[in-house]
Amino acid sequence: MAVTNNLMNKIKLAEALAEKMNFSKKQGEEILDNLTEIITATLKSGEEVVLAGFGAFSARVRKARGGVDPRNPQLRITIPEVVVSKFKAGKNLKEALKKRG
């Protein structure tokens, strides 16, 4: 399976959304901006965002761990605990990608 360099960025996604829903490009951008704001705020509050069949967005704590300073490989450092985003693909998305070829 060949990997392509095609990229769907925010502008292209907003345009595709606007076209599919027969909205203006500006309305498509506003919808996408609002969606990302809502997802971000929900994750920051400690909740998950589940889109049935598509997937789930969540925030997880990555524990503190030891590491090596990249500028000085002999120096051991402690990498602090941090909250990171996570996405788990849903069943419908997984199935669609399996049938991609």
Image (cartoon, helix red, strand yellow):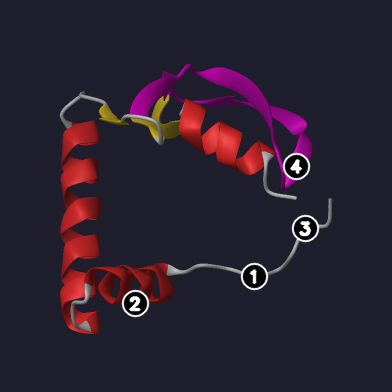
Magenta-drawn stretch contains 72 = yes
Answer yes or no: do the residues labelled 3 and 1 have beta carbons within 8 Å?
A: no
Judging by the rendered image, the residue that carries numbered circle 4 is 72
Quarter of the figure with residue 56: top left
The kind of residue on which mark 1 rests is Asn
Judging by the rendered image, the residue that carries numbered circle 1 is 6
Rounded to the nearest whole Å, what is the CA distance between mark 1 and mark 2? Answer: 16 Å
Answer yes or no: do the residues labelled 1 and 2 have beta carbons within 8 Å?
A: no
Q: Tell me which residue sits at (37%, 72%) in the image.
A: 16
Which numbered tag is attached to residue 34?
A: none
Judging by the rendered image, the residue that carries numbered circle 2 is 15
Q: Position of residue 79 (x, y in %)?
A: 54, 27
The kind of residue on which mark 2 rests is Glu
Front: mark 4 or 3: 3
Q: Nearer the viewer, residue 95 or 74?
A: 95
Q: Where is residue 22 in the image (x, y as percent from the top left)?
A: 22, 76
Q: Nearer the viewer, residue 7 or 46?
A: 7
Q: Where is residue 36 in the image (x, y as percent from the top left)?
A: 25, 53
Which numbered tag is attached to residue 3?
A: 3
Circle 4: element type: strand
Which range of residues does the magenta coloring cover? 58-81
Q: Tell me which residue sits at (34%, 77%) in the image.
A: 15
Q: Tell me which residue sits at (72%, 31%) in the image.
A: 75
Q: Nearer the viewer, residue 9 or 83?
A: 9
Circle 1: element type: loop
Q: Which residue lies furthest to the right in this view?
A: 1
Rounded to the nearest whole Å, what is the CA distance between mark 1 and mark 4? Answer: 37 Å
Of callouts 4 and 3, the N-terminal one: 3
